[in-house]
Amino acid sequence: MRLIRPEEPSSHQQTPRRKGALSRRGLAAGAAALLAAGLVVPAAASAPTAPGNAAKAAPHNVILLIGDGMGDSEITLARDYTVGAGGRLALDGLPSTGTYTTYSVRPDGSPEYVTDSAAAASSWATGEKTANGRISTSPRTHETLPTILELAHAHGYATGSVTTAELTDATPAALVAHVADRECQGPADMAKCPGDAAEHGGAGSIAEQALTAGADVLLGGGRQRFEQRALGGPYKGRTVLERSRELGHQVVTDAAGLRRATPGRPVLGLFAPGAVPVEWTGERAAVGGTAPQRCVTANPARPAGTPTLAEQTRKALGLLQGSSDRGFFLQVEGASIDEQDHAADPCGQIGETAAFDRAVKVARDYAAAHPGTLVIATADHGHASQIVPLDAEPPGRTTTLVTDEGAHLKVNYGTGAADDTQEHTGTQVRIAAQGPLAERVSGVTDQTGLFTTLRKSLQLPKPTRAVGPGNIHLAKSSAVVDNE
């Protein structure tokens, strides 16, 4: 069968899910959503065990933590600065460790050795490779690729996404939307995705699609996208934010509002107009280096009342826990590691890595109290920062930091022009895990294999989709690394 994008959201996507409330109507709605998304579900796997027919199964929980741009150099830099060369981060304590490859593909299916965040996130969200810039759509024919969040939601799991980026940015978008280009974040941003625009019969922008993907919790930045007015579709003339309230979302904008949010209705947290401001600041690297510096650990540009990534993660877990008898899927992204790497800003980068590591600790503490929880921490791609000898004079931009150990540490950025943004790298990156199926991350795998690990941990069926003529080369040359 060929995938068809649904024109209207299913009714089940607009109804808050209560614990134990998976009625026959709810199951039928879930099955309809699967068919609309192009999923084929074996009958035996299409529904939870009916109450009273068997002992209730323990819930299956998955917490996936993504450090955007957090390659081994970024981890080492944060470790050296904050806990010392001999210290260990919470991330380092995950017992099962491996690496995975991160390449994307071109429209003809040949490899693109350096991925962007959109193609990378689409890889683990869907289990299939796609082209840079695309959000959970095939690289050539623009078919919808069903995502792990959509699949989990359709099978009765609670779902959520937390990020320090805009909620419409590439990594969180890959879970909840399907567009031809990552820039199509709000109704006014659709120039690169005319066929996806609601006024042209498409499913709409990333912000519009996020409302009906089935997520119970969405926390991050990007209020500016949700304040744009829909130009077509079922809520033409109203802002996405207005529509979210009509659908029953609890909209929160600061830490106090987040604390007041309660289970039972979806929560939409919008904590900044754009990306959430970083926690640390300092002098950026420069050609010829800088004087030795200590990082400033309180960013004056970060408004009071902005929740930390750890606080958002803890609250999301509290909201999702018990929302479904089956369990939950939660993705947490430390997004601005990448942005500060692009800017050759080591202090901003280290601060965001440290903030991400605190979120990892929250997840690990939760898993320790809930043994049926799989925790995975990884990155979407490598990045630019390198620790170099103090007497080195490399090209590009450098700075010297005074670490918490009182030693000097020299950082170089050389993957872009000295006066321009620094670029991603094509290296494999770390993936580490604890909990059920954690051993699957060991060795060298591929980013698409993460989808299979997530799916198996949640005991979800394998989705299938028809491969049209335009995808024949893709199917042969960039097959999913399933790691079954």
Image (tube, grey):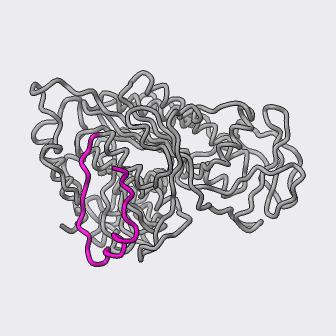
Q: Give, as a single range, the part of the protein colored magenta.
A: 459-484
Q: How many numbered circles does the render carry? A: 0
Instruction: Give the residue at the far front of this rendering.
Output: 443
Q: Left or right? Give the position of 406 relative to 421.
A: right
Residue 200 location, quadrant: bottom left
Q: Left or right? Give the position of 242 relative to 165.
A: left
Does residue 188 show up? Answer: no
Residue 412 rendering spot, x and y as whole percentages: 77, 55
Q: Left or right? Give the position of 27 relative to 424.
A: left
The residue located at (76%, 66%) in the rendering is: 419
Residue 258 rendering spot, x and y as whole percentages: 45, 33
What main secondary structure does the magenta stretch of the protein show?
A: loop
In this view of the protein, which residue sits in the foreground, 382 or 352? 382
Does residue 298 show up? Answer: yes
Residue 478 inside the magenta-drawn segment:
yes
Q: Left or right? Give the position of 284 relative to 270.
A: right
The residue located at (62%, 39%) in the rendering is: 303
Residue 250 rendering spot, x and y as whole percentages: 36, 38
In this view of the protein, which residue sits in the foreground, 390 or 248? 390
From this view, report whether residue 47 is shown above or below residue 444: above
From this view, report whether residue 441 is shown above or below residue 396: above
Q: Quadrant of the N terminus?
A: bottom left
The residue located at (68%, 42%) in the rendering is: 76
The residue located at (34%, 56%) in the rendering is: 209
Residue 192 rendering spot, x and y as whole percentages: 44, 73
Residue 368 inside the magenta-drawn segment:
no
Residue 63 location, quadrant: top left
